[in-house]
Image: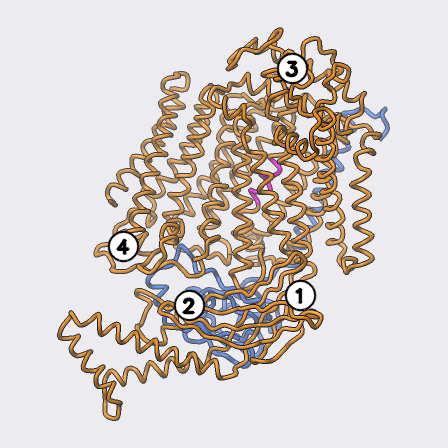
Chain colours: A blue, B orange
Amino acid sequence: MSDDVDPSRKRKIRLVVALSVAVLLAVALIYTSFSASTEAKEPSQVRTTAPGTKTEMNGKVVPGSIKQVGEGIKFEVEDRDGGGALPVTYTGAIPDPFRGGREIVLTGAYEGGKFVGEPESLITKCPSKFTTNASESASAGSESSGSNG
Amino acid sequence: MASVGSVLLALAFFAAAASAVTAVVWRHDDGRVALARRGVYAVFFLLAACIVIIEVSFATNDFSLNIVAEHSSLETPMFYKLAAMWSSQEGSLLLWAFVLSVAASLALYSTRHKLRDLVPWATAVMMTIGAFFIGLMLFAPDVNPFHVLDPAPRDGIGLNPLLQHPSMMIHPPMLYSGYVAWTVPFAFAIGALITRRVDAEWIRATRRFALIAWTFLGFGLLLGARWSYSELGWGGYWAWDPVENAALMPWLLGTAFLHSIMVQEKRGMLKVWNSTLIVATFSMCLLGTFLVRSGVLQSIHAFGNDTVGPYLLVVIGIVVIGSTLLLISRLDELRSPKRIDSLISRESVFLINNLLLVGLTLVIAWGTFFPLIAELFTGNKSSLAAPWYDKYTTPLAVLLVLFTGIGPLLAWRRVTWASAKRVFRIPVAVAALTLVVLWAFTDAAHKPWALALFTLAAFAITGVLQEFYNGAHARQKISGGSFAGALFAVTARNRRRYGGYIAHIGIAVLLIGIAASSSFQTNENVSMKPGETRVVDGREFTYVRPYVKVDDEKYTIGAIVRVREDGKYLTTLETSRRFFRPTGAAATGGIADYMAGEATTEVGLKTGPLHDIWVTVAPNVTSVQHQLARADKGFKKCVAAGPGTPAQCKDLNALMRAAQANPKLQPKALETIEHLQLLSAEKIARQYVHSNAAATFKVIINPLVMWMWIGGIIGLIGALIAVWPSRSRRKGALVRTEADELKEAKYREIRDAELDHASGKLSDEDYAILDAELRKEAVEILDTVGVGAGTASPRPGRAGLPSDWEGGNGNGSSNGNGHHPDGDGHTNGNGNGAPGGPADRDR
């Protein structure tokens, strides 16, 4: 910018340019976040989604349901407050804390009456430092955790 | 003990609340303000006593305390017993309040002779927050650390085995200290706003606390990442999880704050920005604490049992709304008449870096809270995964590295093109060379962002190294000696500047590690039987053999893996999965317990400067579990000694009956049963080893990831150098006043300009103008504060000016100290430096 431009005008122009860039970036951010996001549903809601729709399922592993099948595992997941148990198949790394009674987050799709998890997408919530209590340990303890692929 | 603890906690609450009220109501009364300060010390001692009581209860297995029963057990090792306190919600709250009392005590002690009008308000802010956290423990449900169980259980639940890792024990208090230490600059900022003392005094008084908070938070983040990488069997160090983001956001804002306060200190600008930043940083710290506990967002860190979330939300609301209103009401005082002189100056680069850091924080905040936002607008809980974060954070990080490189090369206020060209020449050449070499000889060309980051990191690191070289070279020219000695001296005498530079190198190296390991990682799952070999990324991985170890505590199923590279032996790795027997209420007492508890993965890791080889095993344990269950049934039959059981079973049955009749025999019976169970488990283990069962291995080749940790440690060292007090400060810390601080700040500026001139960043003409301006400002300060006003020692020379300033011609180059990078008095002829001058002061 040439030196003969009034400094306050120069500042205003800079401010307008900076704000425009910020607004553009914010719009891009908002737009892409809605298109890139994955819906999070509980098992009972997953049953109502169109087959093949990519979904992030949050729920609790049904104690005693974990079975080894070939390279992968199958288990059931229910809503956090119980009910709506849905069969799940999954192949890939299994996080250490994965076991019956634990909350998981799994990305995948509802197909043919079951939820097919994407490989390597299983997240098990950290067995909380703050929630370890007798009842949880007891329910977890009744479930074998060694069902690894 | 518990009742004593409860009383102490209640007293701490009272002391905190009373200090807050006293400090404000009697703020004009020196005696009462001092009393309030002593009240803060009292809070510290009372909370320290509470912690001692809890630690003694942990050490002595006092399971009558709920906190001990839930987080420790008879078997828990002593180290983890002592660290288990902050594994609990109530223990974390106690730690929060305690660290706050430490920080508040230190801050008030160091400012007890200055900022007279501001300190009472800062005391009130810190103690109101303190009283809130202590009050939570006393009045919120289920978070009293002195909650007593009646009757007391015989054994506790124990600490989750996943958390039994040294870094996991240090990580939470580090993050906490980071979060909490930001309270000090926040409280002083609020005090400054209320009393309209919006100059840089509050910044000078609390800068060190901000730096300490930044360091703790950064170190806490690094430890968490390291634990995740080496302990959690997923091979990553960052998952963009809400709880991780919650700690990263205040760190990013804090980084911006640490830079922008320099602009306020030196130029008196960015006052609104700095006040806003510290409010935002502190709010983010509270928000982080809230996210960790409330469970409002889906996180892999599931901290349920939420009882304090709603209270925290109220406090966050008060902090944000109250601070914003206060800021708006003080806008007139905060506006600076000064403008940035030139776009090519250090302050303008700081401003750009600030915008980038805030932008980065906003992106992460948007991603973190997106599930709530989406639910609000669409009714569905949607979340954003790592690729979304990467898309925005990568370019911002690359730009940050660019400006991190440019900043140190520019002088304050103004830079001419000629001097800019001079200092940019070598860093730009090195960056260009890096670009060409990486483009021609590596795969980096396929990953443009990574390539850009490597190139710019090379530019930033070279720029900082050049700064060190120029500084040391200039000093060597003056005072002789070795180059290494000059390098050490120039760093030691300008800790703040060079400590910051070292932190820059650390961050650049850390980002190189992140870029390389995230862009060029190979990650494969392979299934192998013992003796089989698979090739991953050109390296041969052979499953040599399985092994099983059984002890009272756990069942370990592992694998020995041999790695060969280019046909040559490289290393042998051992990886395993450990199954911990549940204790307490969760235990059933059967053999199957061996595999019924928590499981952890032990990573086989070969670390190297070029790449890490990371292997974990997921053994197929179905057969082991079946056999353990069958053994349990057989064992029960044996104990019942039904028809057809061997003679040993009849002996066992007899022993059990005898034990039932005579309690004295029970320990022997229990020991016998446990021994037999162990033998049985060991037999099953041997069968597994000989079964030739396949196992799945996760193999990750992680290039340059080691540099991430090294970079983090370099950054930490830099921060420690920057925060370390100078000799003069160490000696005179107790008697420093605002006048001292103000003068020192100006001396520092003069010395900075000298250094910039000596290292070629400032041309002779620019330096002459700048030096004259600074000296004029220094004389004004001395005239304003008066000779020795509040100073600890008499200053030689006229009107308080250091002797080597007298007759200064405003040029600096012709009076012999222009090329005087550390101003240590060698040129003023008295050999000991002018006390109080820029000469012997910490920069």
Question: Label 1 vs label 2: CA separation?
Answer: 33 Å
Label 3 is placed on what type of residue? Ala
The residue indicated by pointer 1 is B522
For the point 61% across and 75% down, the residue is: B542
Do badges 4 and 1 share one subunit? yes
Task: Indicate the secondary structure of the residue bearing disc 3.
Answer: helix
Question: Label 3 vs label 4: CA separation?
Answer: 64 Å
The residue indicated by pointer 3 is B778
What chain does mark 4 sit on? B
The correct choice, above or below, for A43 with respect to B225 in the image is below
Label 1 is placed on what type of residue? Thr
> Does the residue at mark 3 contact the one at mark 4 (Cβ under 8 Å)?
no
Q: Residue A82 in the image: x percent, y percent? A: 41, 68
Question: Label 3 vs label 2: CA separation?
Answer: 69 Å
Q: How many marks?
A: 4
Do badges 3 and 4 share one subunit? yes
